[in-house]
Image (cartoon, grey):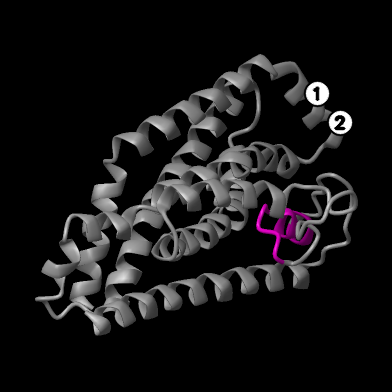
Amino acid sequence: MSFLSGVFRYEYKMSIQRTGLLVIFALFTLFFIVTTFTQQEELLAGAAVEENLWSSASSFVMSINLFIPVVCGILASDRIVRDEKLSMRELLRTTSLTNRQYVLGKYLGVTLSEITCILLMVVFTGISFILIGFPVQIIPMGLLVSLAVNVPAVLFVNAFSVMCPSLMPVRIYQILFTGYWYWGNYLNAEKFFSISDTILNVAGLYPLEGYWGIVYGGARGYTYVDALLNLLVIVVLATTALFAEERIISRREATV
C-alpha cells in the first residue's frame, strides 16, 4: 500500500503542477466567469422562470462537461508512455512496486489532480453566479452536480487514456478520443449512428434527469435506477480498462 500511495502522491503533485493543465483550466475558468457576467440578465431571468436553482447549477456544470473531459483525457494519455520514454519503468522494476500498484497510482494521481481543478472551477464559477445575484447555495449545489456529472466522466475517459496509448501512438489516440467524445455522447442518435442514446453515454444526462429531473435536449425518461446503472457501467468499464493496461504491461515485461 505504501508503494501505491507513493506513486499516487508523486503523480498527483507532478500533474497538479503541470503548466499545461494549470493554463488550460485557468483559461476555461475565465471563459465561464466572463460568460456569466455577459449573460447576467439571461441567467437571472431563466432562474426566475424555472424557480429551480438546481437547473441553474447544472447549466455551467454541463458546460464544463462539454469540453473538460476531452482536456483531461488528452492530458492523461501520456503519463505511462512518458515513463517508458524516460526509462522510469526500468527503475521502478528494481523496487517491490507491482504493475497493478503502478497503473492504479498513476491513474488516481492524474485523475484526482484534474478533479481538483474541476471542483475549483465550479467554485469560482459559482462565485461569479453569486456576484450577479444568485444565492450562495449555488456553490454546494454546483459541487454536488459536478460530483455526479463531471467526476464519473473523468474517471471513465482517464481509464482509457491510460490504457489505449499502450496500443497505439499517443497522438493518434488523442485524435480518435476527441472524435469519440462528441460522437458517443452528443451526436443525435436519431439522425446519425451513435451510442449517445444508450447507457454508455457519460455526458451526464442520466444523473441529471434521474436524480434531479433536469432535462437537456428533450425528456428521455431516465429514472434514479437508470442513473445508478449508468454509473455502474462507467465504473465497470473504467476498471476493465485499468486491468487491461496492467495485463499489457505485465505481458510486455514477461517477453523482455
| Depicted 72 relative to depicted 227: above or below | above
**Residue 116 visible in the picture:** yes
Amino acid type, residue under disc 1 in the picture? Ala
Q: Nearer the viewer, residue 109 or 181?
A: 181
Q: Nearer the viewer, residue 183 or 154?
A: 183
Report helix, strand or loop for mark 2.
Answer: helix
In the picture, the disc for residue 49 is 2
What residue span does the magenta drawing correspond to? 200-211
| Depicted 208 relative to depicted 97: above or below | above
Q: Is residue 175 magenta?
A: no
Task: Identify the residue position indicated by label 1 in the image.
Answer: 45
| Depicted 163 relative to depicted 187: above or below | below
Q: Nearer the viewer, residue 196 or 191?
A: 191
Residue 86, image x, y percentages: 18, 55
Quadrant where the N terminus is found in the figure? bottom left
| Depicted 91 relative to depicted 123: above or below | below
Q: Quadrant of residue 9?
A: bottom left
